[in-house]
Image (spheres, rainbow, N blue to C red):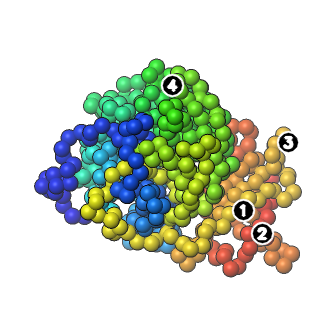
Amino acid sequence: MPPYTNLTLLALGLLSGLASAWGQAPALAGKGAPISDADRLYTGDQSSNTITVIKPATGEVLGTISLGDSRLSNDLNPQYVKVVNSHGLGFSPDGKLIVSLAVTSNTVTVFRTEDNSVVSQTSVDRNAHEAFFERDNRHVWVGTRGVDRIDIVDGLKGGVVGYVQSYGGPSKVVFSPDGKTAYANHVRSPSLSVIDVAQRRVVANITGLGDVFSSDMMISPDGQRLWTAHKMVGKVSVIDLVKRRVVGVMDTGAETNHPNFAVINGTMHGFVTVASTNQTLMYAQPDSSQMPVLLGAIQASGVEPHGLWPSADNTRLYVVNEHSDTVDFIDLTVSPPKVVKTVNVGQEGQAIIYVSGAVSAASNGTQNLGRQGLFDKPALNKILTEAQPQSSINSKAPASCLVTVRPEVGLDMFQVIGRNLAFNTTYTVSATVADRLIPLVDFNATAPMGDGCGTAPQVLSFFKFIGVYELEDLVLTSKADA
């Protein structure tokens, strides 16, 4: 890693103090600039271990930033020291830096948006999930889910420079529009930490969230509301930040992923991706003290919508489809909003961010980009329902699973998400070949869904599938454990 002197940092314009008025997305009406060639979209691609870079003005996929080898190709080599599992993303208020989080190697990597080059890389506490920059465009606050504290990283020079104690495994950190207050959700506590940024300590806790596990959240551009998503139970907690209380909890659906906001016709709207139904739910919430009103659902072009982010001018919403390796461009200026473009990105996209003014007029923003993770053939997907239901609970929906197959280096990744599973039961996905069932993978429920059933959020197996088996020949069966 090259050294960065004060002269270098000054040349980057990164020591000039606080950013000017907040103009990054999500932004208030009239505060964000129109979509331009200087803007960029970034996706965190977990399986290909990349960041896909997109020009939103044209929809052109410029390429990918490689953080290391793609999944399983070299990860288990004892000499491997690169990043594993690129996942979360954040950006600096001035749009000159982005930060990538790797949940397996516990690394925080900061990139310069002008040329996609590495500025710093830091090892942090376990399971670094999501992060954002302070308003000084320098310090990165990292949600590290494996411990009870937030790591603060010097994004320019690298290294951990401080901690904020926050019980329950902080998952993500976001800041108020003025940058004076930070908020952290958790994966082991139904609470939201309210943090004084200057003092670097928790000053209040908002309790009573809809579940102990909250993987993602978002604050509205006016700083008055915050929504936390509860993936395992399919709910979203609606928090009034003015009164610092939970307004209520919305039932959004199984595998609820990320929330975000946009201002449409002067009214604050919230959006929530729901992976199990392949939809983004749309709500109106004019008053932060009142529950949102469901307006409808935007159907994804692909499978398992995950991260989402609006443009700064509130005219577009971008959604990454985790299991089809695509990004949908949604037009928010029409009623109802609809998908108007879809592009292919790296494998298993998790987060997506929109950065205004990421590159200057002097740069085309394609330096240091490659093609890792960009495959001509899309991921294969199929939903299986238990062939002869033996494990359904109290006449609930039968057990099912989503099977996703992706080509990897030398092998294919065979991924299963189990739904409506009975506990103390082993499920098997098999392939029918010449009237025989060949078992491919076994799995069990590992997380409760809140209705007596369980789920298996991610079952992975690696073997040669494409060219050997067919999706249409797969069968799901179950057997009660002894």
Residue at image mark 3: 395
Q: Which of marks 2 and 3 is nearer the N terminus?
A: 3
Residue at 61% from the left image edge and 49% from the top image edge: 338
Q: What residue type is labelled 3?
A: Ser
| Marks 2 and 1 in Cβ contact (< 8 Å) | yes
| Marks 3 and 1 in Cβ contact (< 8 Å) | no
Q: Earlier in the sequence, mark 2 or mark 4?
A: 4
Query: Callout 3: few (<14), some (14-19), or many (20+) C-alpha neighbours within 10 Å?
Result: few
| Image disc number at residue 472 | 2
| Image disc number at residue 382 | 1
Q: Where is residue 63 in the image (x, y as percent from the top left)?
A: 43, 68
Q: Is 281 rendered above or below residue 195?
A: below
Query: Callout 4: few (<14), some (14-19), or many (20+) C-alpha neighbours within 10 Å?
Result: many
At numbered mark 2, what does the secondary structure look like: helix, strand or loop?
helix
Q: Position of residue 421 (x, y in %)?
A: 74, 49
Please state if 324 lies on the left or on the right of 372 as rendered. Answer: right
Q: Residue furthest left?
A: 7
Q: Which of marks 2 and 1 is nearer the N terminus?
A: 1
User: From mark 4 to mark 1, how far is it between C-alphas?
Assistant: 40 Å
User: From mark 3 to mark 1, how far is it between C-alphas?
Assistant: 24 Å
Residue at 42% from the left image edge and 44% from the top image edge: 312
User: From mark 2 to mark 4, how far is it between C-alphas?
Assistant: 48 Å
Q: Nearer the viewer, mark 4 or mark 1?
A: 4
Query: Callout 2: few (<14), some (14-19), or many (20+) C-alpha neighbours within 10 Å?
Result: few
Q: Position of residue 265 (x, y in %)?
A: 52, 34
Q: Which of marks 2 and 4 is in front?
A: 4
At numbered mark 1, what does the secondary structure look like: helix, strand or loop?
strand
Q: Where is residue 293 in the image (x, y as percent from the top left)?
A: 62, 30
Q: Which of marks 3 and 1 is in front?
A: 1
Q: Quadrant of residue 365?
A: bottom left
Q: Which of marks 3 and 4 is in front?
A: 4
Q: Is 31 rendered above or below residue 277?
A: above
